[in-house]
Amino acid sequence: MDHIHIGGIHWEIDWMMVYMAFWMFLLGTVMGSFFDCIAVRRARKESVIKGRSHCDSCGHVLGLVEMVPLLGFLITKGKCRYCKAKIPRDAFFAELAGGVIFAGTMIHLDIDLYLPMWIVFGALLLLISLIDYNQRVIPNVLLIILAANRILAHFIIARDPWTGIPKMLLNAGSVSVPLLILVLIMDRLLKKETMGGGDIKLLFVIGLYMDWKQMILILFFACVLGIAGTLVIQRKKRGQASSDWGQIPFGPYIAASAVLVFWFGQPLIDWYLSLFRIL
């Protein structure tokens, strides 16, 4: 570990961590690109396995340079090299998100037995978000895999795994069950769907990874991000009907909030609880 002084500030740099985070970032960008391909092709009912990536406008098969995550978009300036049609920016942001999730998780945990579990956790949340964004649906199979990832890691690593299962289930239902009851009541009162069942199931599965305090914070963050995202999108679509508000998927906001709470949530929770100790 090196000690560096910049602008009067003392920095400690772990070059091994920087090295590992760099490669995790690259791996994350590759996974983000692949997941975006899955989500887009799934929405178009195309094969995920067969067929090479191509321009949606002219059908030109993408070359090696264009396939490089992040750099391909920047080098081509977001346009097809042949027909000059604009390339959707969704792929670029999916690649960037994958890189940030993988590297951020690596930095947050360092070398830890649970690191593979949390990497898979972030990766699956990214894939779920991309599919929900493109199709307004959260596949049950991905939720099952997400739950299996947590349970499998728990039984492999925990010394006495069976004693932790009841607490895990209580955390899973801490927010999802009350929210389900509230949604059912609101659906009956308003006579329309107020929240998708997939979002509630996603909260339940995320609860297998988090405690009840983190789950409350996730729901709070998701609501804040959802409101902010809705306002931004609606400002760009000012001339459209207000019914479009309900078409914005909530799953990506839940997923993003879960990752943020995993990284930064505990210090916020500790700070909030300390206010009551002061009083």
Image: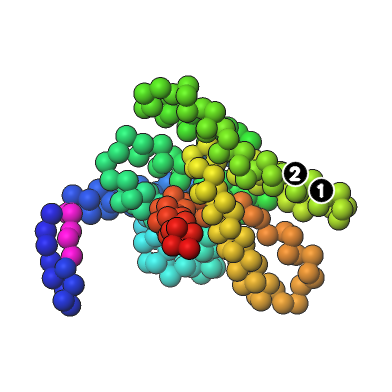
Residue 177 image position (x, y, % from top left):
68, 41
Residue 222 image position (x, y, % from top left):
58, 57
Residue 145 image position (x, y, % from top left):
53, 33
Image quadrant occupied by the N terminus: bottom left
Q: Nearer the viewer, residue 21 or 54?
A: 21
- Mark 1 Cα shell of 10 Å, populated few (<14), some (14-19), many (≥20): few
User: Which secondary structure, mark 2?
Assistant: helix
The verdict on residue 12 being magenta is yes
Q: Is residue 114 above or below residue 52?
A: above
Residue 232 image position (x, y, % from top left):
62, 72
Which residue is at 76% across, 72% downward?
240
User: Which secondary structure, mark 1?
Assistant: helix
Say which quarter of the image contains residue 157: top left
Tell me the kind of residue under disc 2: Ile
Give the residues drawn in magenta, as a range: 11-15
Any part of residue 89 in sight: yes
Residue under numbered circle 1: 185
Cβ atoms under marks 2 and 1 closer than 8 Å: yes
The verdict on residue 124 being magenta is no
How far apart, in angstroms, are the residues tagged by discs 2 and 1? 6 Å
Left or right of 75 on screen, residue 3: left
Any part of residue 67 in sight: no
Tell me the kind of residue under disc 1: Ile
Residue under numbered circle 2: 181
Which residue is at 69% across, 47% downward?
179
Q: Nearer the viewer, residue 141 or 107?
A: 107
Which residue is at 18% across, 59% downward?
13
Which residue is at 75% across, 77% downward?
239
- Mark 2 Cα shell of 10 Å, populated few (<14), some (14-19), many (≥20): few
